Image: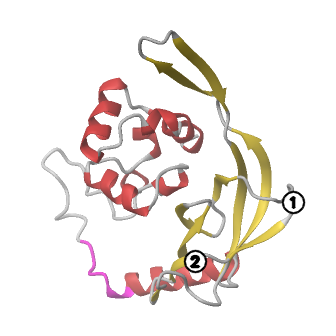
Amino acid sequence: MYAVIQTGGKQYRVAVGDRLKVESLPAEPGDSIELDKVLMISDNENVQVGTPILEGQSVSAQVVDNGRGEKIKVFKMQRRQGYRRTQGHRQNFTEIEITAIAGRGRADSDSGQLKALEAEKQTAPPVDTEAAGTESGETARPVGDEHSTVDDLTRINGIGPVISEKLNSLGYTRFAQIAALDQAGVEDIEAQLSFKGRIERENWIQQAIELSK
C-alpha cells in the first residue's frame, strides 16, 4: 500500500516504514504528525485519486529528526558595477518516518502484500526449470530475485513520482545507479529531463549512497 502526499510544495510517494526528508515542519523529534494533503492512495486492489486532495484521508508519520542540509553557495553580480556577493545557504529539513496510511499501519500493509503475493502465486503458470536452462548450463533466474528489484527512487528528496517514472524509462531503477553517477551521467540525465543543476543542488547522489547501504 502506498500514497502520494504533498508537503512543503513537493509531492512524495510513500509507504509505511519509509523515511524521507521534507521541508521543515513545526514539530520535535518523537512527535506524531498527520499529513492531510493526500493526492492518491493505492492498496494494490483499489486506487483512490483526489481532485486534487482526498477528503477525509491522511498519512500518519513520526518525526525522526530536524536538521539542515549541506551548504550551497549563492553568487550574485552586476556587470560593470564591480558588484560581487557570495552567500551560503543551508536548507532546514524535517526527517519523518511513515507509520500509517489512511489508518492502516505496518501490520495491515504487510497483510495486504501477503494476500497479493498469494494471489499472484495461484495465477502464475508453473515454471519448467529444465526447459529454462541456458546452453551454458545456467538455470533461469526466478521472478522476484534480488537482482530484479526496483528501488523506490521517490525516497530521494527531490524525486517525485513523475521524475521517478522518467528515470526508470532512462534505465535508472536502483539507488546504486544514482550513487554511481559521474559527471557525464549527471549531465546526460539533466539534458534528458531539462533540469540543469538540480541533481547537485538537491544532493541526489549522496542521498542515494545512504539509501543503498
Q: Which residue is drawn at 38% across and 61% down?
A: 162
Assess whether mark 2 and mark 1 are in contact (beta carbons under 8 angstroms): no
Examine the structure image and report whether residue 101 is included in the region drawn in magenta.
Answer: no
The x, y position of residue 185, in whole percent, is 31, 31
Which sits in the foreground, 165 or 179?
165
Q: In the picture shown, does residue 102 fall above or below 145? A: below
Q: In this view, does 116 lie to the left or right of 6?
A: left
- In the depicted structure, whether residue 82 falls above or below residue 157: above
Name the mark nearer the viewer: 1 or 2: 2
Q: Residues within 10 Å of mark 1 (few under 14, many from 20)?
A: few
Question: Can residue 56 be seen by looking at this rendering?
Answer: yes
Residue reaching furthest to the front: 81
> Residue 38, labelled with which disc?
2
Q: Residue at x 57, y 45 (%)?
A: 211
Relative to 189, 43 lies left or right: right
Q: What stretch is highlighted in magenta?
A: 122-127
- What residue is shown at x 62% (from left), y 59% (from top)? 8
Identify residue type, mark 1: Gly
Locate the N terminus by quadrant: bottom right
